[in-house]
Image (tube, rainbow, N blue to C red):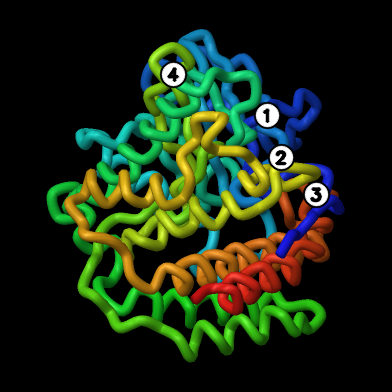
Amino acid sequence: MKFTIQALPVSFSALGRQVEMTATPADIAALGPWLEAHVPGLGQCRGFEKFGDGQSNPTYRVDASGGTFVLRAQPPGQLLPGAHRVDREARIIGGLHDTPVPVPRILAQSDADGPLGRMFVVMSHVAGQIYWDPALPGMAPDDRRAIYAAMNQVLADLHDVEPEAAGLADFGRKGDYFQRQLATWTRQYRASETDGIAEMDQLISWLDGNLPEDDGRSGLVHGDFRMDNMIFDPQSHRVAAVLDWELSTIGHPFADLAYQCMQWRLPNEGAFKGLGGVDRAATGIPDEADYVAQYCTRRGLPGIENWRFYIAFSFFRLGAILQGVYRRSLEGNASNTQTAHLYGKAVPILAEMAMAEVREAP
């Protein structure tokens, strides 16, 4: 079944590192003295620029005499319980600092009593390239192949990290991950529901009736693992940093893998930049079976069962996230209100894509 999603002006996968030169909130001026006092090596603060397309936690480039830094804050307004926890992002980034998973360095952190009146963190700026189109247009096949291999390696490295060794033993609950996640995101979806979406209701019912038995696998998961949440070294093609850890927790590692493969089902046209319709053999990009096989080889796994559930769940979870973004746009609290408002149109399409996956699977 072919799905074409043309209604949105930007990809929902863009959480915002494209600089918007005119975006400087009025309350940002209060940050200068705080940053100069609390961020090692910052020196004199010279200015801020908001990274443009962000829908979750507003993110700013901080220019200072000591170099460039990154500030990531909670959005203003009423937030859903447990959402936008930049303090959790800071914690896992700090825990991963001495592991094979490349991350920025956390430099300072403020709670809601600080100068912004909401939590924020300051981290190092990592130089490199962000690729917004997973088809990697204009690249040679060997370069594309290397980039996908680097992503696959980083994902396997993340899932091999022992939470206890990283000081993250209490970062989430072990066991029954998908059961708990289905309950959590169903609750979040219902809390942000505006108009009833029949396709989402059908998908929730199918997922609830097809939950696989817990297989005991557990580890650190990113929660939003995709190409444009990474910075790459443009020469070596290695991953220089993995970004946007807001949805990270202790969970089932197959959730990250399926989420990335779910995105590849989206068309590589219009607003949504997936890999649907891309000739992967000709471009050097591995097909899904090869990518999953590479991951299994790196982690010493024989294969993955219940794959269609993991894919369908990924569609549902993304739909629930976008519904929350849309709801915030109606309330005037989205980081990019115009774009967020349009995201609501994608939710029923994602749910129908999930149901098509379920119906077409053997």
Q: Amino acid at mark 3?
A: Thr
Q: Are marks 1 and 3 in contact (CB under 8 Å)?
A: no
Q: Amino acid at mark 2?
A: Asp
Tell me what residue is drawn at x 69 percent, y 38 percent: 27
> Closer to the camera, 263 or 318?
263
Q: What is the quadrant of residue 100 in the picture?
A: top left
**Image location (x, y in percent) of residue 293:** 32, 49
Q: Give the number of the disc on residue 304.
A: none
Q: Which residue is mark 2?
A: 53
Q: Are marks 3 and 2 in contact (CB under 8 Å)?
A: yes
Q: Disc 4 to disc 3, how far (Cα)?
A: 29 Å
- The mark lying in front, picked from 4 and 1, is 4
Q: Give the number of the disc on residue 339.
A: 3
- Mark with earlier residue (3, 2): 2
Q: Are marks 1 and 2 in contact (CB under 8 Å)?
A: yes
Quadrant assignment for the N terminus: bottom right
